[in-house]
Image (cartoon, helix red, strand yellow):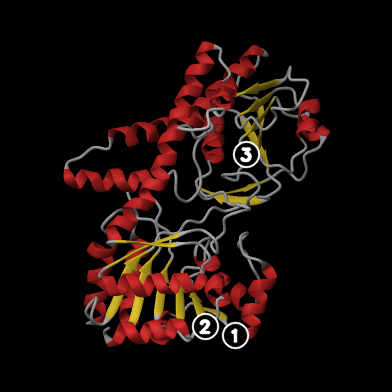
Amino acid sequence: MNEMKQEMLKKIADRTLRIGVVGLGYVGLPLAVEKAKAGFPTIGFDVQQQKVDLVNAGHNYIGDVVDSELADLVASGKLSATSDYSFIRDVDFVAICVPTPLDDHQQPDISYVRDSAEAVAKYLHTGTAVVLESTTYPGTTEELVKPILEEGSGLKCGEDFYLGFSPERVDPGNLIYKTKNTPKVVGAIGKDATEVIARLYEAVLDGEVFQVSSPAVAEMEKILENTYRNINIGLVNELAILCDKMGIDIWEVIEAAKTKPFGFQAFYPGPGLGGHCIPLDPYYLSWKAREYEFHTSMIESSMMINDRMPEYCVDRASRILNREKKALNGSRVLLLGVAYKQDIDDYRESPAFRVMEHLEKNGAEVDYFDPWVPQCPYKGRQYHSIPALTAEALEQYDLVMITTAHSNVDYELVQKHAKMIFDTKNVMKNITPRDNIEVL
């Protein structure tokens, strides 16, 4: 066993390995907390000083982190935060958990990964393991991160430091699976690196740690996870459009299909896709595929269908208003929910905003109510929820459109006082009477 591997495994075993986490968002902060809870001295880094100050004060801002646990870890000295990259000198293991969004042309924006790698390289030292956790296209770790780290540090990957990829699997609001108990995939450059990185995650997490042969395999499996969901949601969204034309209830169709105990997994239609992975990851793969003169036709078709859903939902809303002899232009519309999924405050890539854009483009006056998101910025504009969902408020709108299925909304009140309701999530399926309710 080589000396670097032996030394790192020893540090993992006796909990003296010092860990750094770059990026303290929905992925990084829960990961930093779990590593500190496992007994490893942990330093978090973020370019946003506000997040750094909140962590150092023991104040949590991520839903999947327990407030008291964060406060206790900070008070005990196990967890701290900084906005100075020089902390890399003092750690043995670095997890990079930065955003990988799309740019204005729907192409991968890997600038955060590149900038982080360049900053880490300046302070990288012998005997360090670096792991990229940000979702990205296959090849990023070896083709982008590795050369940056080697050139910036003067060190050799596999000899002086280890490098791998271990995709995040964060599902905000999931009551069963958190960072701690979700299985982890690790792919690294070389067997020694894979073993060391996997051993660290095994010491931190309760979920199984599954080793693959390379970073590219780990990167591709993450894309597969979310592209699988994108395609199946695209399928059911297309069927929802067809079922509307045929006068068939797609929701009843799905419930019937669910009775099959094998070979079928239920997916549901909606106003579009939101969140940090499903709407974005297929673009990473289709972009990379073009390098090989390959077009991911099935994936791109599902993306087109899902991207179309906000506009389709606005068309349906217009039809509902037309039946009441009202034009969309000049009508008042209330959106119920701007979070991208139920019972969370995360509105990243939420389709509700695109629905809002299409409504306003067609002349509607739009407000929203979301008990989880009282205010939020979008494309340079600050949006605010109406203060309360009351009978008086509901009666002011020509149409109430449900775009997020929050469980803490009084839908009986909505049914009783809304003139017309367009339920894109079927959250009101058990509410009666239904004369003023139309379902996607």
Residues 153 and 182: in front is 182
Query: Residue at the spot x=29%, y=63% of the render?
Result: 141
Note whether 241 is above or below 164 in the view shown: above
What whole-number distance in Å separates the C-alpha atoms at marks 2 and 3? 39 Å
Question: Of helix, strand and loop, which one carries label 3?
Answer: loop
Query: Residue at the spot x=50%, y=25% of the render?
Result: 312
Percent across and percent down for residue 425 are 61, 32
Query: Residue at the spot x=29%, y=56% of the render?
Result: 217
Question: Of helix, strand and loop, which one carries label 1?
Answer: loop
* Residue identified by numbered label 1: 77
Q: Amino acid at mark 1?
A: Gly
Q: Among all residues in the image, which is located at the extreme left? A: 293
* Residue identified by numbered label 3: 404
Marks 1 and 2 close (CB-CB < 8 Å): yes
Horizontal placement of 380 versus 150: left or right?
Answer: right
Quadrant that contains the N terminus: bottom left
- Badge 1 density bin: few <14, some 14–19, many ≥20, Cα 10 Å: few
Question: Which quarter of the picture shows residue 75?
Answer: bottom right
Marks 1 and 3 close (CB-CB < 8 Å): no
Percent across and percent down for residue 12 are 44, 81
Quadrant that contains the C terminus: top right
* Residue identified by numbered label 2: 41
- Badge 3 density bin: few <14, some 14–19, many ≥20, Cα 10 Å: many
Horizontal placement of 405 versus 23: left or right?
Answer: right
Q: Amino acid at mark 2?
A: Pro
Tell me which label, 1 or 2, sits earlier in the chain.
2
What whole-number distance in Å separates the C-alpha atoms at marks 1 and 2? 8 Å
Note whether 34 is above or below 327 in the view shown: below
Note whether 222 is above or below 418 in the view shown: below
